[in-house]
Structure formats: structure tokens, C-alpha cells
Image (spheres, helix red, strand yellow):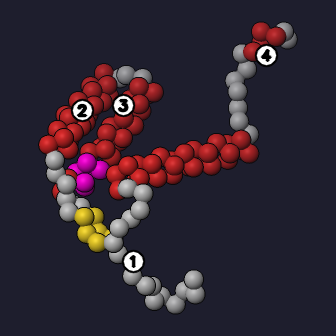
Amino acid sequence: MGGAEAAQQPFHLNELQIGVVAWAFTLVIFGVMGLISVVSEGRELRIGRVAPRLTNLLSWAILVVAVLLFAIAVTLGVGIAFGWSTALIGLLAAAGCFILAMLLLFYKEAFIGDEASFDRRDDGVPW
């Protein structure tokens, strides 16, 4: 057993390392969500209703992202039909989910708006 055989052994994480990676990944997701929230809504939430903000730039962004989502969906269908590798199909599916989330975010900003209220809670919880 030389060094060449030891170098070919697969690398495995133990339970503690998997837990640390999961926590780190979760905190990264929360951090990215916070950054997106600050960019889209500002640092301080204001009481009241924010009207929908459909602008020309947002309209173009919705159009481009929708066309990109359609292209990814067609490519994913072709990949499934022709038996592409599982990793590539998974990558296309993940990209489609991410693009769909962007499309929904743009749609919400353009057509729905926001409402924020700071009402006192009366649910019996002491804090």
C-alpha cells in the first residue's frame, strides 16, 4: 500500500462535519436573503403601504428572465429525452428553480407591492 493508493481513496465527511457544513450553508442562505431584503426594501422598514413599482427596467427584467426560464425548461426537457447525465439535469433543474424565484420576486415588486404594520400583539405570550 503505497501513497498512490491512499491518494485515490474517496473523501468522506463525518456526522459533525456534515452538521457544520449544513449550519454554514443555512447561515449563508439567511445572509443572502438579508442582503436581498436590504437592496429591495431598504435598511429600515417603514409603516404603510408601498404601491407596486412597475418600471420599464423591471418590465424588461421580467421579460428577459421569463425567456431565460423558458429556454432552461426546453433544454431540461431535451436533456431528459436524450438521457444526459444526472449531474447536468440536476444543474439545469436547480438553475430553473433559481430563475423562477427571480421571476416571482420581480413579479411581486412590479404588480403586488408591500404592506407593513406594527400592531401590538395580544396573543397571551408574555414577551
Residue 70 visible: no
Name the disc covering residue 6, or none: 4
Q: Which quarter shows the N terminus?
A: top right
For the C terminus, the quadrant is: bottom right
CB atoms at circles 1 and 4 under 8 Å apart?
Answer: no
What residue is disc 3 on?
92
> What type is the residue that disc 2 sits on?
Leu
| Mark 2 to mark 4 CA distance (whole Å) | 45 Å
**Is residue 64 found left or right of 20 in the rendered image?**
left
Q: What amino acid is at disc 3?
A: Leu
Q: Which residue is mark 2?
A: 68
User: Residue 116: x percent and y percent?
Assistant: 33, 70
Mark closer to the chain start, 2 or 1: 2
The mark lying in front, picked from 2 and 1, is 1
Mark 1–mark 4 Cα distance, whole angstroms, equals 61 Å
Pinpoint residue 91: horizontal percent, then vertical percent: 41, 31
Closer to the eye: label 4 or 3: 3
User: Which is more N-terminal, label 4 or label 2?
Assistant: 4
Residue for badge 1: 118
Q: Are marks 3 and 1 in contact (CB under 8 Å)?
A: no
Q: Is residue 77 left or right of residue 35?
A: left
Could you tell me which secondary element the residue under label 1 belongs to?
loop
Q: Main secondary structure of the magenta part?
A: helix
| Residue span colored magenta | 104-109
- Helix, strand or loop under label 4: helix
Front label number (3 vs 1) = 1
Q: Are marks 4 and 3 in contact (CB under 8 Å)?
A: no
Q: CA distance from mark 2 to mark 3?
A: 12 Å
| Dots 2, 1 in contact, CB < 8 A | no
